[in-house]
Amino acid sequence: MQLQPKHGTNNKKKIFNDPVYGFISISQEFIFDIIEHPYVQRLRRIKQLGMTHLVYPGALHTRFHHVLGAMHLMSKAISTIRRKGHDISPAEEQAALLAILLHDIGHGPFSHALEHDIVSGVHHEDISIFFMERLSEEYDGELDLALEIFRNRYPKKFLYQLVSSQLDMDRMDYLNRDSFYTGVSEGKIGSDRIIEMLNVVDGNLVLEEKGIYSIEKFLVARRLMYWQVYLHKTVVAAEFMLIHVLRRAKELTQSGTEVFCSPALAYFLRNDVTSDDFRNKPEVLDLFAQLDDYDILGAMKVWQFHDDQVLSTLSRRLIERKLFKIKVSKKEFSENDKQAMREKVMQKLEIPFEDTRYFVYNDVLTNSAYNDASQHINLLMKSGKTMEVSQASDNLNISALADPVEKHFLCYPVFNAGKARQLSLLNGIK
């Protein structure tokens, strides 16, 4: 029997029809092999915007959509930089495309919401590295260069900056894509023009001076998208409810109470998984690779009938979109405010005061459109000098956008159901 080549035969130069960019071409067979890998296909089952569809019904696009779009923009950026006389070898191009394709592979179900409790202090970018290392082993080191770029260890720093910086292809894609699917037009940016203005000076990514107004619009769009979409108060309420559903499920599981869930989710509820576990126990990454949004949704559909009142009430409210109310203020809420709300919940639900922490939350929302302290956006002036964008701009918006804006919030349930409905909520029976 004749063995097939490692990366298969010719029919792998595929075309994806993307609603944001039109046709996206996959020109390299190895990249298509990676796209077809179960690790990447899993991203089809993880929504890009977590619970945002509860506010914007169209926001059902996935991480898979996003990574394909970001890779498409990376291809365009590499073409632009090459055309301007900078050397990028075919191997470096493939590695950069793989790095951006896999940059979100470490996301868990519902994206950022579950980094709080499913794993303990392990950022999704670290898990992405664990996945990439595993893939590189599987493909005889063919992702080693992509890993070097992703970790910012490769001498050509601009390749890393295309993957992760304030001008990266990740942001270029998610702003336009999230704007498209939510219908929030304020988030639409001129990514084509920004990419066309990219250049490299002293090994670092810069933007040519004539692209300054496109960057101003990009930063303003980012600020608006954070307040209107990513930090929308109802989205925040839903995500905090989800965090506390899983927190309660984990507490119950670890105390010996039976909680229905998939085998993969059960492992992460039973154990406090750390970075060392990912490094030293291969089965941990295998189990994480089985987790997606459906594990959580399927579990919550059952949990809404659980005997534990906290778990059942929170799960039912999320399933039925009976979301908590959230108040936002420029000033921090007092301890008296939180105490009064917890006492009200304790009386209404007839639960111990300790359990009210699952129903009343407070935290701070921070919106920073441009962080000039960590990663600059540098402009290449006509004189040949480079200048940080907030210093070069004649628009005061850029300087203002560099200052983070903080808002405090207090999140709590409302009790406006009829008497019979209230009893069903209390008894955990629909």
Image (tube, helix red, strand yellow):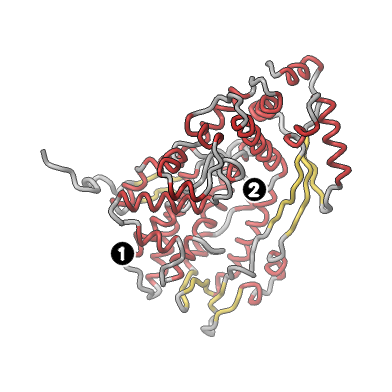
**Picture coordinates of residue 423 (x, y %)?**
77, 16
**SS class of the residue under badge 2?**
helix
Which numbered disc covers residue 230?
Answer: 2
**SS class of the residue under badge 1?**
helix
* Res 68 seen here: no
* Res 93 seen here: yes
When asked about the image quadrant of residue 234, the answer is top right
Q: Residues within 10 Å of mark 1 (few under 14, many from 20)?
A: few
Is mark 1 in CB contact (under 8 Å) with mark 2?
A: no
Q: Nearer the viewer, residue 206 or 305?
A: 305
As drawn, which residue projects farthest toward the front? 256
As drawn, which residue projects farthest toward the top? 420
* Residue carrying label 1: 90
Number of marks = 2
The C terminus sits in image quarter: top right
**Picture coordinates of residue 113 (x, y %)?**
61, 43
Q: Residue at x 43, y 44 (%)?
A: 281
Q: Is residue 142 left or right of residue 271?
A: left
Q: Is residue 12 left or right of residue 226?
A: left
**Picture coordinates of residue 275 (x, y %)?**
51, 50
The N terminus sits in image quarter: top left
When asked about the image quadrant of residue 85, the answer is bottom left
- Tell me: residue 83, above or below residue 31: below
Mark nearer the N terminus (1 vs 2): 1
Mark 1 is on which residue type? Answer: Pro
Mark 2 is on which residue type? Answer: Tyr
Distance of label 1 from label 2 (alpha carbons):
36 Å
